Amino acid sequence: MYIVSLGGPKWWQQASRSVSISASLSRVESPPARADATFKVTMLPGDGVGPELMTAVKDVFKAGDVPVEFDEFHLSEVQNMASEDKLEELLSSMKNNKVAIKGKIHTPMEFKGELASYEMRLRRKLDLFANVVHVNSLPGYSTRHNNLDLVIIREQTEGEYSSLEHESVPGVIECLKIITRAKSRRIAKFAFDYATKKGRNKVTAVHKANIMKLGDGLFLQCCAEVAQLYPKIKYENIIIDNCCMQLVQNPYQFDVLVMPNLYGNIIDNLAAGLVGGAGVVPGESYSAEYAVFETGARHPFAQAVGRNIANPTAMLLSAANMLRHLNLEYHSHMVSDAVKRVIKQGKVRTGDLGGYATSDEFTQAVIANLAV
Amino acid sequence: MLSNMNMPRLAQMQTVTLIPGDGIGPEISSAVVKIFQAANAPVSWEERNVTAIKGPGGRWMIPPDAKESMDRSKIGLKGPLKTPIAAGHPSMNLLLRKTFDLYANVRPCISIEGYKTPYTDVDLVTIRENTEGEYSGIEHQIVDGVVQSIKLITENASRRIAEYAFEYARNNQRSSVTAVHKANIMRMSDGLFLRKCREVAESYKDIKFTEMYLDTVCLNMVQDPTQFDVLVMPNLYGDILSDLCAGLIGGLGVTPSGNIGANGVAIFESVHGTAPDIAGLDLANPTALLLSGVMMLRHMGLHDHAHKIQKACFDTIREKKVLTKDLGGNSKCSEFTADICRRVQDLD
C-alpha cells in the first residue's frame, strides 16, 4: 500500500499494512469517533522559528482532522520567560501526556548562576537519554549524496554536556566530560533494540578512544558488550574524525550510528547537511516513559524569525512520526505523504531547498495534498 | 626568466630537517627531495630518525641528534610515523608536539582540479589549537563505571592560537577568521576561548572576525564549503573539522598539514598513515607530503618555488595520464614523480 521510505523495510511495511487497513476501515465507518480518541500532546514552541513551525503543524493537523489536541507552553531563556515554576508546569504536563512536540529553546551564551541551560535541564529531568535523527534523502530533491538512509542515535544526558565547569586558577578552566557504564550500556542497548525493531543491519559506534582511552574506551567497551547480545546485527566502530571524513566521501557505508553526546551533535548536523539541511531532517528524543518530537538538527534559526522563510518539512515529518508513535497510522501517512508529494513535485519549495515559496505557501501546498 | 633562474642559486641555502618516517615514508620523502631538486629549491636536507629512546631519568624522548638538528634548522618535513601499540612509549606525534611545543596545526584545504569530489571550489584553512582542550590526557575513573575526562582551556593557549590565526590570515591574504566553538553548552571553557579570540580580533581590524557554533559549521560545511575562509578552534573540534575538510577535497592522501611551535619551529607533515601494505612497492602517492613541502616553502618565504611545484603537481593530476592508484590511475610513484619533475623544469 504505502511505500514507507523511513527506516527498515520488512518488519515495518508488514506492520503498517495491517494497522493502516484496519485504521482506515474504522475511520471510514465511524468518523465522529474523534471525541474519545483525541490525544493530548504537550507543545513547546521554543525560540526562533519554533512558533512558526508549530503553527504549520497545527494548521496541517486541523486541515487533516487529526485527533490531537495541543497543550501549549512557552518556556524561553532569551525572552525572559523561563522560571522554575514554568519548568515544573511543563514537566507535570509531560507526565500526563507522555508525548510532546517542541522547538529549540535557545541557550544564551551568558549565564546567570546555572551553567546548564533550560533545554539541558529539561532533558535531564525527563531523562530523555536517546536522541534519534532520521537522515533520509527526500525523493525529488537532489543533493551531492542521494538515496541516503541513516539513523543517528545519540546519548544526550551525559558526556561533554555535563555542565560541570570551574575556573581552577584565573585563566585556567576545566570542563568535565562524564561517561558512565550505566548510561553507555543503556544507549547501546537502545541502539541495538532500535536496529532490531526497524530491521536494520549494522550498528556503528563512533568514538575517540585512541585519545580518550578511559572515557570513550568505556563507551566502546559497553557497546561491544551489548553487541554480543544481538548476533544478528553487525557491529563496527569508527573514530569520529574518520567518520566525518567517510560521511562526506562515502556515507552509504553506514546504517545506524550510536555515539556519545558531543559527537552526536556534530554528526547529526553533518548528516542533516548531506540531505538538505536543518529544514528537512526530523528527530525525536526518548526516555523510558516519554517521547519528545522535534527537528533533527536543533537550531533556533533566529535570523529567519518573522520573515516567513523557514522550512516546515522537518517539523511536519517529525509530527508525522509522532502520530505513528501514537498509533495514528492513517494520519501519520497522510501527513508525511503530503509533505513528500509537495517536495517531489518541486513547484513549491522554501529558500533552503532552492525555491522561492514562503513557509505559509509550503504549508498550504501540504494541506492541499492531504485530501488524497 | 634568466634572472629568476640565477636568483635561487645566489639565495641562501636553508637547512631543513627531513624525517622520512615509516612504511611508505622513505619513498615519498625521496620523491619530494627529487622534485625540490628539479625545482632548484635552495633547500639542503638533513635526514633524521625520531624513534623514541629512553633518556636519563627514564623519560621517553626523541633522539638528541634529531632535536639538535631541528632546533638549529627550525624547519622540518615529516613523513608518516607508525605508533607501535605495546611499545610502552607515547605516540611519536605526541612526543614531537611536546618537545617543540607545537601549538598550532594548520591545514589548508583546496579543491584539486582533476581530482573530482562532490565538493568543488573548497578553499579554506583550519587552524587548530594543538596542546590542550579535550586532548589533555587527564582522565580517571572516579568509582567503578564512572569515568571523568578533563577538558582544559587556558587563557594563554587560547590567546596564542588566536594570534597565530590572525597573523596567518594577514600573511596569506585571507579575508576572514571564524572562531568555531560550543560556548552555548560549555559556557565557561569555550566562553574563555571565544573571549580571547574576540580580544585578539580587536588588534586585527583589517581581518573580518566571525564566530559560529560547531554544529552550524558542520551543517553549512557540507552544503556550501565556499562560505568559509580561515577557521580557528580548540583541539577536538579542530581534529574533527580538519578531517572533515580533508574529506571534502579527497582525503588524507592529498591534504597538507603544518605544525607551528613556540620557538619558531615549524614541522610540516603528511597526515596519512604509513600504509605498510604498499611500502617499498613504488605505489605510494607523494602528493600529501609534496603539498606539505609547498606549505613549508611558503613559510620560508620561497613563494616562487612553492608556486612552481604546486602548479606542476596540480597539472600532473589534472592531465590524469600518470596517476597513482589512489588517485584513480595505475602508474608508479616514480613515474608520477618524474612527470612532476619534468613539468617543474619546463616551467623555468
Image (cartoon, coloured by chain):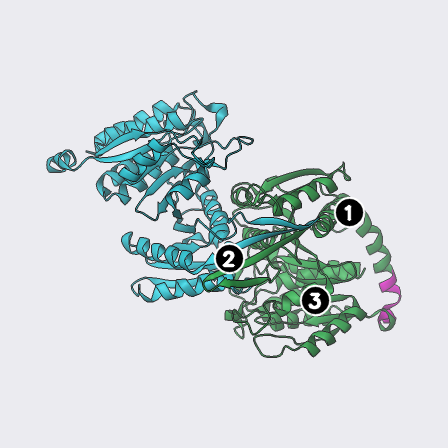
Chain colours: A green, B cyan
Identify the secondary structure beneath mark 2. Answer: helix
Could you tell me how far apart the alpha carbons at marks 1 and 2 are, in whole angstroms? 32 Å
* 3 and 2 marks in contact (CB < 8 Å): no
Residue type at mark 1: give it.
Lys
Q: Residues within 10 Å of mark 1 (few under 14, many from 20)?
A: few
Q: Residues within 10 Å of mark 2 (few under 14, many from 20)?
A: many
Residue A132: horizontal and vertical position, in percent? 68, 54
Residue type at mark 3: give it.
Ile
Identify the secondary structure beneath mark 3. Answer: strand
Q: State the residue lying farthest toward the front.
A: B57
Instruction: Identify the residue position indicated by label 2 in the image.
Output: B214
Q: Does B258 sit left or right of A130 as displayed?
A: left
> What stretch of residues is rendered in magenta?
A26-34
Q: Main secondary structure of the magenta part?
A: helix
**In front: A306, or A164?**
A164
Q: Is residue B205 visible?
A: yes
Instruction: Identify the residue position indicated by label 3 in the image.
Output: A101
Identity of the residue drawn at 52% across and 60% down: B182
Identity of the residue drawn at 31% across and 27% down: B339
Sequence order check, earlier mark of 3 and 1: 3
Note whether B117 is above or below A132 in the view shown.
above
Q: Residues within 10 Å of mark 3 (few under 14, many from 20)?
A: many
Q: Does B23 sit left or right of B32 as displayed?
A: right
Tell me if residue B30 is in the magenta stretch: no
Identify the secondary structure beneath mark 1. Answer: helix
